Image (cartoon, coloured by chain):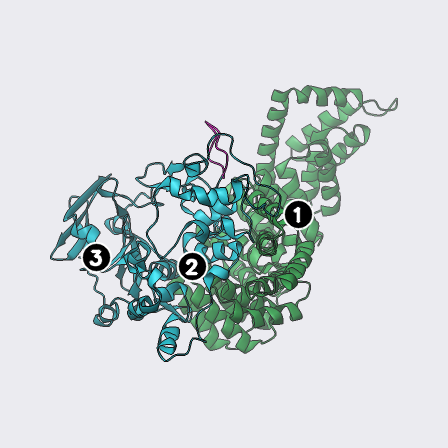
Chain colours: A green, B cyan
């Protein structure tokens, strides 16, 4: 099993990605050749390979670099590739191997730069995007890293099970660190379904479950047991083993009765199949932390979906007060107002929420209804069309309820 | 053998609603609602004309054979793989015409994999389960329902089955009764008997077309429910509020396009196509009042049986059911199902 914190396993993970990356790279080059673009690249390569008299030519450097790499002299290969791409910056293979070699030497900033240059030449290369994301991860550039890893996933970098593990795990870590806990749980669901687990993964899941925006290596040692227990219970629930999860959560609550956010997460994960149980958990969370904005939001939402807008309204008001920039809180309040008859206030709030999170399906749905209720049929139709576009089979999945921030927009 | 038994308490509570007869005393125009299919959306043993009329039903698919046998008003649902057989007594029959059964076992609920279809006069795969390939006899018997599914099933097909967000089968009345839609109807009935009419439930006919679409859509599936669940494809034709809201002529504040503009839920569905002409012509006649977006166009082809062209009947693939498409539109030959 890979591990972010274990150098040995981390190297293994990198090696897996690198190996896979080479394979994909070959596939990619083959594809380009088939399209007749390889010839153009070669021509570009040949045309820009001049070097000053007395200096090695690009052809010599590239041949020597390949030879050094094949013979295992990686430091020399790295040096030669760097020289070769200086002479010919349009040589994709040079940047690719340079990136890999720098990455393998834990030299992440130059590695990321090499992959950036490579991606400038081959924009949709999944392996290079993934590796740049992993470089950025090591450099602490969380948002660019997440962006690259998710793009790599969407480009197909995770078709291999081992790569999928590496990418999903890092995605989960980053989403947690960035406070996008529900999305992190979705990333970790892959491991639960595949029954892939170890202590560190459970700790990572626990951090997302308890909404602690940290990497496992940064977790407070005195809190590790609590976090890991929450992670284990959540992992069981993600795997679909509800009876064991229920038992694990009960044990957790016996030991840590006032631990914040665990009831919320349990409720959140129960919500798609058991709304009543979810509502009860959201209410238990509020008994621990009456000011938990995301919990008020989800409780309001669950009540709205259960056709209880009058009950939802006070919860939604609290959520919106506590988290004025949380689009879901504004959405819940907007919907609660809409369904209790205050269409004008609802419309204003929903428009504000949409400005915060323009791709949020639920906000478009609510606005379609608000406009329709107030006779603004053209606006209603526009919002309905937006919803239908967002839910086309080829579009991305809808944002999970409770997701925070505009960055979660789908 | 898998045994299922409803408790005596549940059985005792599942008598016809007392509210309907008291409502009919004053609301005579709605007095025949208990005869409608909606009022029979759930049937209990002894009151199930579908099964009473078909004493033996069978269906074979793959490795399994399903049978529903009815004797002395008691029906038993069986599935066999030729070696072993599971059988359960049928207690909850969902649907007044096509019929699907729900079973309870060890606190879990299951929906039958096969259903009765009137047009076939026999059993067929339950709509929506066509892709299921049961691997065990238990799986062939029924699809396990989530707690939310169960609440939705009973919440729509019966009355008083959900209270305070909880499933309360002990208070269930089969089918859609007055109080199912008209909240507070029971209190109103007793208050009205004492001369107090101040507690009458809100008038649903005062709702906007948009609100009404969402109200009826609680069971018939609202536009947003379908969109949220990303249900796409021809099977969506079953969800009339969704289809209607996709119509170009849908207007959330124009009562001429609301559900009850065409349908009276207190009466049987009218199947005579010409009877809906006046509803269409309320907007599409030369003399009709304009809509909020202008004068509605008149049809260059005909002025009668509008729905026969503009609301075509759609057969579900691999299924025995046909539905009227409520996405009102100009239908072009060969055009794919708009969705």
> Mark 2 — residue?
A273
User: In the drawing, what numbered circle is on residue A147?
Assistant: 1
Mark 1 secondary-structure assignment: helix
Does residue B332 belong to the magenta stretch?
A: yes
Indicate yes or no whether the magenta region holds residue A215. Answer: no
Q: Are marks 1 and 3 on the same chain?
A: no
Q: Nearer the viewer, residue B309 or A269?
A: B309
Mark 2 on the same chain as mark 1: yes
Q: Categorize mark 2 by other alpha carbons within 10 Å: few (<14), some (14-19), many (20+).
A: some
In this view, the residue farthest toward the right is: A53
Disc number lying in front (2 or 1): 2
Disc 3 sits on a residue from what chain? B
Q: Quickly name the residue at label 3.
A: B90
* Magenta span main SS: loop
Q: CA distance from mark 2 to mark 1?
A: 31 Å
Q: Chain of mark 2?
A: A
Q: Are marks 1 and 3 in contact (CB under 8 Å)?
A: no
Of circles 1 and 3, which is in front? 3
Density class for disc 1 (Cα within 10 Å; few <14, some 14-19, many ≥20) is: some
Task: Please indicate, yes or no, whether residue B86 appears anywhere in the rendered image.
Answer: no
The span shown in magenta is B329-339
């Amino acid at each position: 099993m890979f591990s972010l914190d274990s150098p040995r396993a981390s190297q293994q993970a990198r090696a897996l990605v690198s190996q896979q990356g080479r394979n994909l790279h070959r596939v990619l080059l083959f594809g380009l050749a088939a399209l007749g673009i390889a010839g153009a690249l070669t021509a570009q390569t040949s045309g820009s390979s001049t070097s000053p008299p007395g200096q090695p030519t690009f052809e010599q450097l590239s041949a020597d670099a390949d030879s050094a790499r094949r013979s295992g002299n990686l430091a020399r290969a790295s040096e030669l590739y760097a020289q070769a791409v200086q002479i010919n910056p349009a040589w994709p293979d040079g940047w690719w191997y340079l990136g890999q070699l720098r990455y393998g030497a834990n030299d992440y900033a130059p590695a990321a730069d090499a992959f950036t240059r490579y991606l400038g030449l081959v924009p949709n290369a999944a392996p290079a995007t993934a590796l740049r994301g992993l470089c950025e991860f090591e450099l602490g550039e969380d948002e660019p890293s997440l962006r690259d890893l998710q793009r790599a996933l969407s480009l197909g970098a995770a078709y291999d099970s081992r790569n999928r593990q590496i990418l999903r795990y890092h995605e989960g870590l980053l989403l947690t660190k960035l406070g996008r806990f529900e999305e992190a749980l979705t990333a970790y669901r892959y491991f639960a379904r595949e029954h892939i687990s170890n202590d560190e993964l459970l700790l990572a899941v626990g951090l997302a479950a308890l909404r602690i925006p940290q990497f496992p290596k940064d977790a407070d040692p005195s809190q590790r047991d609590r976090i890991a227990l929450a992670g284990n219970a959540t992992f069981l629930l993600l795997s679909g083993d509800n009876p064991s999860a229920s038992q694990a959560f009960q044990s957790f609550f016996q030991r840590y009765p006032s631990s914040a956010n665990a009831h919320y997460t349990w409720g959140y994960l129960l919500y798609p199949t058991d709304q009543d149980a979810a509502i009860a958990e959201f209410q238990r969370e509020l008994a621990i932390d009456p000011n938990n904005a995301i919990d008020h939001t989800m409780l309001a939402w669950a009540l709205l979906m259960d056709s209880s807008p009058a009950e939802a309204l006070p919860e939604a008001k609290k959520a919106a007060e506590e988290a004025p920039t949380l689009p879901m809180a504004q959405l819940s309040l907007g919907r609660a107002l809409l369904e209790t008859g205050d269409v004008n206030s609802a419309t204003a709030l929903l428009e504000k929420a949409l400005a915060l999170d323009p791709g949020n399906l639920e906000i478009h749905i609510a606005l379609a209804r608000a406009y329709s209720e107030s006779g603004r049929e053209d606006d209603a139709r526009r919002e309905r069309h937006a919803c239908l576009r967002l839910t086309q089979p080829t579009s991305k999945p809808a944002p999970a309820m409770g997701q925070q921030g505009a960055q979660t927009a789908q | 053998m898998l045994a299922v038994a409803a408790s005596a308490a549940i059985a005792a509570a599942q008598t016809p609603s007392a509210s309907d007869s008291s409502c009919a005393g004053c609301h005579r125009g709605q007095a025949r609602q208990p005869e409608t299919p909606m009022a029979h959306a759930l049937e209990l043993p002894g009151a199930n004309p579908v099964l009473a009329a078909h004493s033996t039903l069978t269906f074979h698919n793959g490795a399994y054979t399903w049978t529903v046998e009815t004797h002395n008003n008691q029906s038993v649902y069986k599935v066999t793989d030729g070696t072993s057989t599971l059988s359960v007594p049928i207690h909850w029959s969902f649907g007044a015409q096509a019929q699907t059964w729900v079973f309870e076992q060890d606190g879990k609920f299951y929906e039958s994999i096969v259903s009765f279809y009137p047009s076939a006069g026999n059993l067929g795969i339950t709509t929506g389960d066509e892709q299921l390939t049961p691997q065990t006899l238990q799986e062939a018997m029924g699809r396990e329902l989530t707690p939310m599914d169960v609440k939705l099933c009973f919440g729509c097909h019966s009355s008083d089955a959900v209270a305070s967000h909880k499933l309360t089968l002990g208070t269930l009345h089969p089918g859609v009764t007055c109080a199912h839609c008209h909240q507070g109807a029971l209190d109103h009935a007793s208050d009205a008997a004492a001369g107090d009419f101040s507690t009458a439930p809100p008038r649903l006919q005062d709702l906007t077309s948009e609100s009404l679409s969402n109200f009826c859509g609680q069971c018939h599936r609202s536009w947003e429910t379908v969109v949220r669940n990303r249900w796409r494809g021809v099977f969506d034709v079953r969800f009339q509020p969704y289809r209607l809201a996709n119509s170009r002529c849908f207007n959330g504040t124009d009562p001429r396009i609301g559900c009850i503009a065409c349908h009276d839920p207190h009466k049987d569905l009218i199947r005579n196509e010409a009877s809906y002409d006046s509803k269409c012509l309320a907007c599409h006649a030369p003399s009709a009042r304009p809509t909020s977006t202008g004068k509605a166009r008149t049809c260059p082809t005909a002025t009668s049986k509008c729905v026969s062209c503009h609301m075509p009947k759609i057969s579900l693939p691999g299924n025995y059911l046909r539905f009227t498409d409520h996405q009102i539109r100009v239908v072009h030959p060969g055009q794919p199902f708009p969705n």
